[in-house]
């Protein structure tokens, strides 16, 4: 079953608390569209720094393999491996970008799809918010235990 991490954006200037509608759920696992169309996927997700790094790395690898007169099949395998790496690490890249933008990770939730994961998360989240709004219970202190002096037969 897929696992999702939940991220909260920093509040806007007119907000004191972030609206829950702005939370982002990032699924762990392989992202097919990031594998097939990595530049488009990075552009759509607005992962600008990752997109620039991807473009630079693919150009450097392509030129380096051409400079070394590597056969086209090997260059194709190298491009496939880069695309496969992006597909597997897409969630990590997305989370890294959110962390760089000062988004707060609230936790993770398991669900068959994103909608079920959202329901589970917000169900527990509302319980926690209501519990934290209640006044804390008064502490109950136990009476101190009075002990006699140790007997000579006591062993430490």
Image: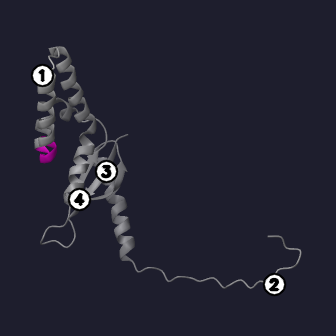
Query: CB atoms at circles 3 and 2 under 8 Å apart?
Result: no
Q: Is residue 46 magenta?
A: yes
Q: Which mark is residue 149?
A: 2
Q: Say whether marks 2 and 1 touch (CB < 8 Å).
A: no
Residues drawn in magenta: 44-51
Cα–Cα span, label 4 and label 2: 58 Å
Q: Quadrant of the N terminus?
A: top left
Q: Is residue 34 left or right of residue 150?
A: left
The picture quadrant where one finds residue 131 is bottom left
For disc 3, the marked residue is 5
User: Which of the two marks, 4 or 2, is nearer to us in this view?
Assistant: 2
Circle nearer the N terminus (2, 1):
1
* Residue 133 point in image, percent of width and height: 35, 76
Q: SS class of the residue under badge 2?
A: loop
Element class at badge 4: loop
Magenta stretch contains residue 28: no
């Amino acid at each position: 079953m897929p696992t999702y991490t939940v991220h909260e954006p920093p509040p806007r200037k007119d907000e004191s608390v972030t609206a829950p509608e702005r939370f982002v759920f990032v699924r762990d696992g392989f992202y097919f569209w990031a594998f097939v169309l990595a530049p488009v996927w990075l552009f759509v997700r607005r992962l600008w720094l990752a997109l620039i790094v991807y473009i630079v790395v693919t150009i450097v690898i392509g030129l380096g393999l051409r400079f070394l007169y590597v056969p086209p099949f090997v260059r194709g395998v190298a491009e496939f491996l880069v695309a496969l790496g992006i597909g597997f690490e897409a969630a990590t890249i997305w989370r890294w970008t959110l962390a760089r933008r000062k988004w707060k990770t609230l936790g993770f939730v398991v669900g068959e799809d994103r909608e079920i994961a959202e329901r589970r998360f917000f169900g527990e989240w509302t319980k926690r918010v209501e519990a934290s709004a209640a006044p804390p219970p008064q502490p109950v202190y136990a009476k101190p235990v009075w002990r006699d002096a140790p007997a000579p037969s006591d062993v430490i």
